C-alpha cells in the first residue's frame, strides 16, 4: 500500500512538472527503456503531417508541419502593441500564415521562416526572429524540462536560405533554459557552428556551407549532457546541468539595424524547415531522482552545520564553567 501511494505521488509530480502531454508524446517509448535508445540514431525522424497535396496546395504552415505543441514568435508587432513581437499560439496557429515571414513553400514540402534586421525584438534581445518555441498540452502551456531528468530530443531537417547583409549571422535551432541559450546551430557566412553558452564558435561543423543545402540537426539531452548531431553524426557533447529548458527552431537573425545595412525588410535572415519533431521520455523515478540530487547538496550542507553546532554544544557541556577571579581584601 505504501509503495502504491508513493507511485501515485511520483506520477502526480511528473504530471505537474511536465504536463500530461509528456506521456502522450512518447507512446513509442512506453515499451522501450531509455538505455535502449541509441544515442547516435536515437529515434527516426518523424515525417511532417501534410494535409495539402499538389492539386489543392496548402495555405498554412500547420498543413506541412505538426505544430500542435509549438507557438511562433514573429518579427512584427501585434494589434495594439507594435513594440512587442506577435506570438501566435494554438488553436489560432493551426490556421495561421503570414507571408513572407511564416508560410509554406509553393510545393508544400516545407515552411519558410524569415526575420528582417528591422524587425521587432523580444525583451532581452536586440535581434529579430521568426521562430517556433516548444509548448506542451496541445500548445496551451510552455515546455519546461531538465537536462538531468529523462531523455529529450529535437530533430530538425532544414536549410539556411538567406543571410542578412553586413552581419551574415543566423540561428536555425537551439536549446534554451530558464535564463539563456544552452547551444544553437549558428551560421556565419559559410561557417556553420555549434555554440556553447556565450562561446559562438565552440565547434565548427563545416566551413563551406552553401545556402539552400538541406541538413538534419539533432539534440539528444540526458544525464546532464547534450549530444549534438549533424546529418546523423555526433559532433560534440556538452556537459551542462540545466532546468526550465525548451527547444526552438526557425530563423533567429543575429543582426539588427545597429550592425547591418540596409535597415529595411529587404535585409533578412531566412530558413526553410522540412520536418521538426520532439521526443521526451521522463518517468516518475526520473523526476524523483532529479529532485533528490538537486536537494542533496543543500541537505549535506545543513547536516554539516548541525553537526558542528552539536559538537560545539557537547564541548561546552564537558568543560568546567569559567568564573572570574574575585578581587578585594580577604576577610581574616
Image: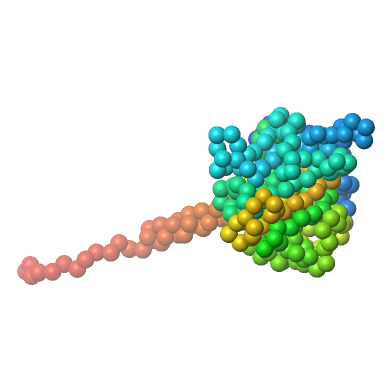
Residue 275's x, y, as percent?
Answer: 84, 45
In the image, residue 173 sits, relative to residue 64, either above or below, namely: below
129 over 225 or under it: above or below: above
User: Which sits in the foreground, 160 or 202?
Assistant: 160
Residue 219 in the image: x percent, y percent? 78, 53
- Please state, as top left, top right, bottom left or bottom right, where the N terminus lies in the image: top right
User: From this viewpoint, is residue 284 visible?
Assistant: no
315 to 25, vertically: above or below: below
Q: Residue at x 64, y 38 (%)?
A: 87
At 60% from the left edge and 48% from the top edge, which residue is drawn?
A: 121
When the figure is inspected, residue 302 is found, relative to residue 2, above or below; the finding is below
Residue extending furthest toward the right: 55
Which quadrant of the view contains residue 231? Answer: bottom right
Residue 241 or residue 124, whichever sits in front: 124
Q: Is residue 179 left or right of residue 99?
A: left
Image quadrant for the C terminus? Answer: bottom left
Work out whether residue 326 can be spotted: yes
* Residue 148 % position (x, y): 70, 51
Q: Residue at x 60, y 37 (%)?
A: 78
Count of numbered circles in the view: 0
Point 87% across, 46% down: residue: 45
Left or right of 53 on screen, residue 237: left
Amino acid at each position: 500500500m505504501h509503495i502504491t501511494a508513493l507511485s501515485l505521488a511520483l506520477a502526480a509530480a511528473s504530471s505537474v512538472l511536465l504536463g500530461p502531454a509528456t506521456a502522450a508524446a512518447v507512446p513509442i517509448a512506453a515499451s522501450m527503456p531509455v538505455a535502449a535508445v541509441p544515442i547516435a540514431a536515437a529515434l527516426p525522424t518523424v515525417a511532417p503531417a501534410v494535409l495539402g497535396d499538389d492539386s489543392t496546395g496548402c495555405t498554412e504552415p500547420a498543413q506541412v508541419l505538426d505544430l500542435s505543441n509549438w507557438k511562433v514568435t514573429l518579427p512584427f508587432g501585434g494589434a495594439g502593441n507594435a513594440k512587442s513581437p506577435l506570438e501566435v499560439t494554438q488553436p489560432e496557429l493551426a490556421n495561421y500564415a503570414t507571408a513572407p515571414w511564416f508560410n509554406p513553400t509553393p510545393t508544400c514540402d516545407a515552411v519558410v521562416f524569415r526575420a528582417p534586421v528591422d524587425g521587432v525584438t523580444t525583451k532581452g534581445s536586440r535581434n529579430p526572429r521568426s521562430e517556433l518555441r516548444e509548448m506542451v498540452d496541445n500548445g496551451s502551456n510552455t515546455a519546461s524540462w531538465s537536462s538531468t531528468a529523462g531523455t529529450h530530443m529535437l530533430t530538425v531537417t532544414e536549410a539556411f536560405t538567406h543571410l542578412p547583409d553586413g552581419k551574415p549571422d543566423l540561428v536555425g535551432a537551439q536549446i534554451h533554459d530558464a535564463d539563456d541559450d544552452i547551444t544553437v546551430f549558428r551560421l556565419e557566412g559559410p561557417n556553420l557552428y555549434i555554440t556553447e553558452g556565450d562561446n559562438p564558435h565552440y565547434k565548427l561543423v563545416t566551413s563551406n556551407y552553401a545556402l539552400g543545402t538541406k541538413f538534419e540537426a539533432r539534440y539528444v539531452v540526458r544525464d546532464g549532457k547534450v549530444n549534438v548531431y549533424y546529418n546523423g553524426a555526433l559532433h560534440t557533447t556538452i556537459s551542462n546541468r540545466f532546468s526550465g529548458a525548451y527547444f526552438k527552431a526557425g530563423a533567429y537573425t543575429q543582426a539588427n539595424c545597429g550592425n547591418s545595412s540596409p535597415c529595411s525588410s529587404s535585409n533578412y535572415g531566412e530558413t526553410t524547415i522540412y520536418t521538426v519533431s520532439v521526443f521526451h521520455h521522463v518517468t516518475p523515478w526520473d523526476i524523483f531522482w532529479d529532485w533528490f540530487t538537486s536537494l542533496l547538496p543543500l541537505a549535506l550542507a545543513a547536516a554539516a552545520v548541525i553537526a558542528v553546532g552539536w559538537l560545539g554544544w557537547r564541548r561546552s557541556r564537558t568543560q568546567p564553567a569559567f568564573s572570574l577571579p574575585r578581587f578585594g581584601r580577604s576577610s581574616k
